[in-house]
Image (tube, helix red, strand yellow):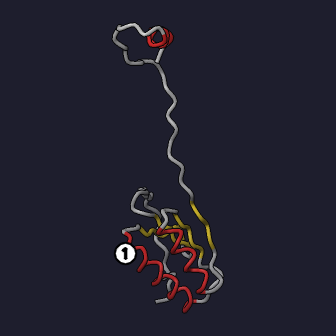
Amino acid sequence: MDLKNTALKFWHTDTEEVGYGGPCLVKSGHMDILVRTPRQFSDVREYADALMSGSTLMISFEAVDCVMRNRIFDYLNGVSYIIGARVSKVQDDMLLYAPSSVEINKEAGKKSSRSWLGR
């Protein structure tokens, strides 16, 4: 609202208010990305709760063995399926779990020769 319209409103005149056509500040939304490295399977419940609450997770599997990696992967993928989240591979030992409200734009890169799940 500009100065003229503010003054007119203040003095209670019946002149019609004109819409503001000048620049305005728009604050963009805030998004949390939680970067986590699970060390044991019990850590995963906290990650699943965060994902269900709308946070984006980046999970590094470098600290767990292949069997634990598969368990964590299956659990978080099950949660992702239920809530409609997206899963994207960032690198060999890292996955991004994003809620449906987050769009993932991934640039095509070279494919890894090894399966990170060990399957």
Query: Which residue sits at x=42%, y=10%?
Result: 12
Q: Amino acid at mark 1?
A: Ile
Residue at 44%, 59% (x, y): give it: 106
x%, y% of residue 105? 42, 56
**Residue nearest the observer in this picture, 61 or 42:** 42
Vertical arrangement, residue 36 with respect to residue 54, above or below:
below
The secondary element bearing badge 1 is classed as helix
Q: Image height check: is 52 above or below 104?
A: below
Figure quadrant of residue 94:
bottom right
- Residue at 50%, 67% in the rendered image: 96
From the top left corner, tell me how far across and down residue 102 is, in percent.
43, 57
Task: Please give the name of the residue rendered at 57% of the width and 60% of the height, measured from the top-left corner.
Answer: 33
Q: Residue 71: horizontal and vertical position, in percent?
A: 51, 88
The residue furthest front is 12
Nearer to the camera, 14 or 74 = 14
Judge by depth and name the residue closer to the eye, 46 or 116.
Answer: 46
Q: Quadrant of residue 17?
A: top left
**Total numbered circles:** 1
x and y, in percent, of residue 54 in the image: 48, 62
Establish if 83 lies above or below 12. Answer: below
Question: What residue is pinned by disc 1?
Answer: 82
In this rendering, position of residue 35 left or right of residue 117: right
